Image (tube, rainbow, N blue to C red):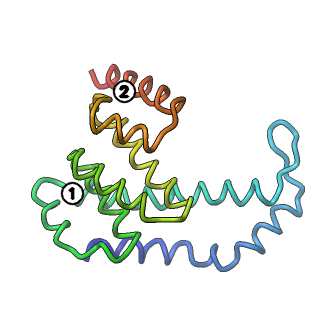
Amino acid sequence: MLYTYPNKLLYFMLKDIDQNIDRLIDEILSQNPKTKRGMLITKDMLEKSLQTQAMVYILSIYDFVACTASVGKGMDELNKFSYDDNLNYMLQNIMMEENNGNFHNFSMKAEKLYDSVDSDMLKDMISMVVRKYFLNHEVVLNGRAQHVADKFFGQEDRKKLQVLQVKNHIVKK
């Protein structure tokens, strides 16, 4: 099924990195790398950066599939698949709903998944998808949309999000 292929591709592409991550980090740190401001890069900084890059990479693969698969009636078929027993499939389904543009279905599924996981990394990934929805779709921040924005973003992030929404709206015209 469509949900399984992105995971197979990601596993194939990332398994060697995952198996050798400690050695790769040690090798990078042995070069005494520094930030642009001259501060020595620590193991924690490097791990956080690699984690963020991995999240973005994973989400981009999922989003590519979601963009091409969630057109029109295809979403009905994708929702028939039993994706509830796999967090990766649930995340992909939320991304498909985001691309489909049905805010109610999208927001309900995003909140449900967000509330059901303990992983900060997965919560961050869900928040990134929610942010993409707000940026790519015209969403007025009231009612359900305001509730979702409050749940996923702090007050400062909501202000930034509103500015970005206005910029995107201007660019689209």
Q: Residues within 10 Å of mark 1 (few under 14, many from 20)?
A: many
Residue 80, above or below 120 = below
- Image-quadrant location for residue 103: top left
Dot 1 amino acid type = Ser
Write the residue at 37% across / 22% down: 166
- Image-quadrant location for residue 2: bottom left
How far from the left and from the top, in percent, is residue 141? 32, 29
Q: Which of the image's four quarters has the C terminus?
A: top left
Residue at the disc numbered 2: 168
- Mark 2 vs 1, N-terminal side: 1
Write the residue at 28% across / 28% down: 140
Q: Which of the image's four quarters has the N terminus?
A: bottom left
How far from the left and from the top, in percent, is residue 162? 41, 26
Q: Secondary structure at mark 1?
A: loop
Q: Secondary structure at mark 2?
A: helix
Dot 2 amino acid type = Asn
Write the residue at 48% across / 39% down: 153
Residue 170, above or below 121 = above
Write the residue at 71% across / 60% down: 47
